[in-house]
Image: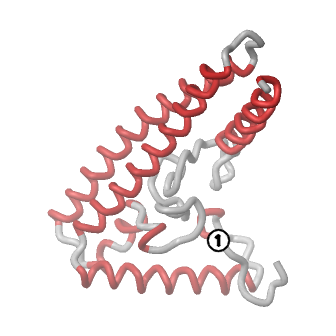
């Protein structure tokens, strides 16, 4: 029984480590520990709510909003508030990410210890899972906070600009544009490409 549980836990740990060790979508060895996280920035073409995709619910990154600040007619107060929210979020994410790495390290140690109790391994797995859940909730909260800074009109404008950008990128992908950044790649291939 313990051996079977150990095998299952090892597989789960392997999958977790593989997912967190993958290079970021930027092509560098960055850690993208969650939706919306790019190379030291939010957005990076990735989603807020899901790691892939784009959209208000999953792509309202700080960099994206600031790049469209003039089109969105952001006030100075809105720009300041968004920057403050983003900085606070980044600091919290750093702390959570460090906690997650510690929990994963502890779990790896237990997995390699033939004398580790099943209950202790299960607790370590629960700790890793709980930290990942906290990080996901933080991202949802941050998204809601950023959204609350924008007016309804600005939210609609952002949504429309995002749809335009997505269409433009898909056309460029379909036409074989080699100048696309990885962050611009759509989550799904354009229709008719056979992928």
Q: How many marks?
A: 1
**Residue at 58% from the left image edge and 26% from the top image edge:** 124
Q: Position of residue 178 (x, y in %)?
A: 74, 72
Res 105 → quadrant: top right
* Residue lying furthest front: 1
Protein image colouring: secondary structure
**In the picture, residue 146 is in which quadrant?**
bottom left
Where, quadrant-wise, is the N terminus in this rendering?
top right
Residue 45 in the image: above or below residue 95:
below
Above or below 34: residue 124: above
Residue at screen point 28% across, 54% down: 83
Local SS, label 1: loop
Residue indicated by mark 1: 187
Q: Which residue reaches farthest bottom?
A: 192
Which residue is more in the foreground, 30 or 22? 22
Left or right: residue 175 compared with residue 144: right
Please say if 155 is above or below 67: below
How many residues crowd mark 1 within 10 Å: few (<14), some (14–19), many (20+)?
some
Q: Nearer the viewer, residue 85 or 102?
A: 102
Q: Position of residue 27 (x, y in %)?
A: 68, 52
């Amino acid at each position: 029984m313990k051996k079977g549980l150990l095998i299952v836990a090892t597989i789960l740990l392997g999958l977790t480590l593989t997912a967190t060790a993958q290079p970021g979508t930027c092509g560098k060895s960055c850690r993208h520990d969650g939706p919306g996280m790019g190379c030291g920035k939010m957005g990076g073409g990735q989603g807020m709510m899901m790691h892939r995709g784009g959209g208000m619910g999953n792509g309202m990154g700080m960099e994206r909003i600031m790049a469209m600040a003039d089109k969105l007619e952001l006030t100075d107060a809105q720009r300041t508030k968004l920057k403050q929210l983003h900085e606070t979020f980044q600091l919290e994410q750093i702390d959570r990410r460090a906690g997650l790495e510690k929990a994963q390290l502890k779990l790896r140690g237990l997995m390699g210890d033939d004398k580790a109790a099943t209950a202790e391994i299960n607790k370590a797995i629960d700790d890793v899972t709980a930290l990942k859940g906290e990080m996901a909730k933080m991202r949802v909260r941050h998204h809601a906070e950023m959204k609350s800074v924008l007016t309804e009109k600005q939210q609609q404008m952002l949504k429309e600009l995002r749809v335009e950008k997505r269409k433009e990128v898909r056309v460029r992908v379909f036409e074989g544009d080699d100048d696309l950044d990885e962050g611009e790649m759509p989550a799904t291939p354009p229709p008719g490409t056979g992928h």
